DNA sequence: TATTGATAGTGTATATTTAACACCATGTCA
DNA sequence: TGACATGGTGTTAAATATACACTATCAATA
């Protein structure tokens, strides 16, 4: 096809659905918009892509600027290109989703991201633009992905109990799992390393702490190992 | 995020990986480029997105213009946004993949798409831009998707035999399947309707023809039915 | 017209995986 | 020291997946 500069161009943005997990609930990080349109409404963190940065870099930059988050798990999700999704002009957005350890983030929240706030996924406010659609797509992707790739660990602190992990999966999949079968399966992957510590949670028997063995995961992944839950 | 017109903008394109199936082989439809850069090289059909059309519409329009294909199965794949993927300027491409019935297309090929040509996926020529990456991503997606969604029918003519279907799956998955187990499973989905005709292929016992029951598929899909192969 | 060659079509037995299920252990706190 | 809360552990039955071999029916031809 002809290469032609004369047509008007769509603006290109990135948006991020940031998932966190805390107190048995899956949460999403939102930003309150300071400007029109949708001023005062909640929206996904995101912004315009610069001509000299890749999409991934743009998403990470916006995330750092607006929420203070860095070095998180981030993947491209889907590109939203409806003509009227932005009332100002044509804006195409490459949506991403991120998984963060809530514990890490809480310290920074006060400084970098004064107008960022975590919302339980089941109680999201009305969102600006088509961001509700983007969140829905991200949740569907997360639910699908978690079944065959051990990405849930990105949402947990470095040390966690098997109950923590099970509650996370139950929150993501929105269904109850059998405790014994769950433990059998996840331990069977051989990706969990039992630490010498236990979690003194009070009021009951202390739980064994584990960490995720990322190196081993990379090796097994290369061999085409199947991590289906 | 600041809303700012002053920065240069990336150009936005769509590209399509068009899959077809013929003579036991999975094929991809390529276009020979008429202009620089990569003049004379083979490339994916695609082109610039207009400001008044969605991504899906843009992909279908380009497909019709460059290959004569219409009303095909088409889904968004991934957005490629490396900074230097186009030597002229920054171009971000929303890649799609399409599944077409080769039999339908062959009639049109001579007229609409003089410089379009089908290549076996295992013998692709060197491709322009990062199109080899896009094809690889599309194949991976197709291989993943075919395992849990009956989209293979999009690649077959309306009437087909179980052997046709099996050969298609074997071509996509690049592995041999057991005939009896395969037939048991696909018939078990209840999506195949046996026609009253048989295929007179000559030289051997004629094979039962089937059609895909798209209505039933839609109904079962809504009920969350599992089509895992 | 009998034989050969090519693909169609069919069932069972075994191995593997999944699903369902209940009790004791160990800590805190009243 | 008893109540309460969560941690931790195996077995059995059901369902599913896998492996496997022979007969059927046509065309071509010897």
Image (cartoon, coloured by chain):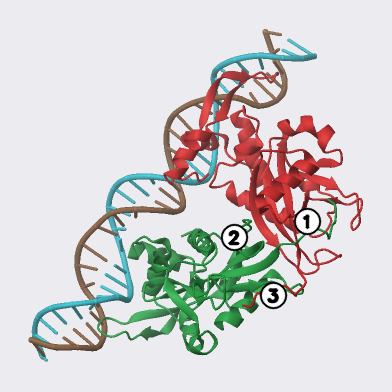
Chain colours: A red, B green, C cyan, D brown
Task: Identify the residue shown where x is 48% and y is 69%.
Answer: B152
Report how far apart the C-alphas of labels 2 and 3 lie in the structure. 17 Å
Contact between labelled residues 1 and 3, with CB atoms less than 8 Å apart: no
Q: Which residue is mark 2?
A: B85
Which quadrant of the view contains residue B50?
A: bottom right
Q: Determine crowd level at label 3: few under 14, some 14-19, many 20+ residues with C-alpha closer than 10 A.
A: few
Q: Which residue is mark 1?
A: A131
Q: Determine crowd level at label 2: few under 14, some 14-19, many 20+ residues with C-alpha closer than 10 A.
A: some
Name the mark nearer the viewer: 2 or 1: 2
Please state which of residues B22 and B52 is positioned toward the viewer in this rendering: B52
- Is there any visible trace of residue A214 in the rendered image? yes
Report how far apart the C-alphas of labels 3 and 1 lie in the structure. 32 Å
SS at badge 1: helix
Instruction: Give me the chain letter of mark 3.
Output: A
Please state which of residues B122 and B221 is positioned toward the viewer in this rendering: B122
SS at badge 2: loop
Above or below, C18 against B11 in this view is above
Task: Identify the residue shown where x is 57% and y is 61%.
Answer: B225
Q: Determine crowd level at label 1: few under 14, some 14-19, many 20+ residues with C-alpha closer than 10 A.
A: many
Above or below, B85 against A72 in this view is below
Tag on residue A4? Answer: 3
Instruction: Give me the chain letter of mark 2.
Output: B
């Amino acid at each position: 096809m002809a290469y032609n500069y004369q047509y008007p161009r769509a603006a290109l943005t990135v948006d991020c659905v940031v998932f966190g997990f805390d107190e048995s609930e899956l949460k999403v990080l939102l930003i309150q918009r300071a400007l029109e349109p949708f001023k005062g409404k909640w929206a996904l963190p995101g912004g315009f892509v610069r001509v000299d940065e890749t999409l991934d870099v743009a998403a990470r930059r916006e995330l750092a600027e607006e929420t203070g988050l860095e070095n998180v798990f981030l993947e491209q999700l889907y590109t939203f290109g409806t003509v009227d999704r932005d009332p100002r002009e044509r804006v195409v957005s490459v949506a991403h989703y991120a998984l963060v350890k809530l514990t890490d983030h809480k310290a920074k929240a006060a400084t970098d991201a004064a107008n960022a706030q975590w919302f339980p996924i089941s109680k999201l406010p009305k969102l600006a633009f088509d961001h509700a659609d983007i969140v829905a797509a991200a949740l569907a992707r997360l639910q699908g992905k978690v079944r065959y790739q051990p990405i849930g660990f990105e949402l947990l602190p470095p040390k966690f109990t098997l109950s923590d992990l099970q509650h996370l999966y139950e929150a993501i999949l929105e269904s109850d799992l059998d405790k014994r079968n769950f433990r059998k399966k996840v331990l069977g992957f051989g990706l969990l390393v039992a630490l010498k510590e236990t979690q003194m949670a009070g009021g009951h028997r202390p739980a064994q702490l584990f960490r995720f063995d990322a190196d081993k995961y990379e090796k097994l992944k290369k061999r085409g190992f199947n991590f289906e839950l």
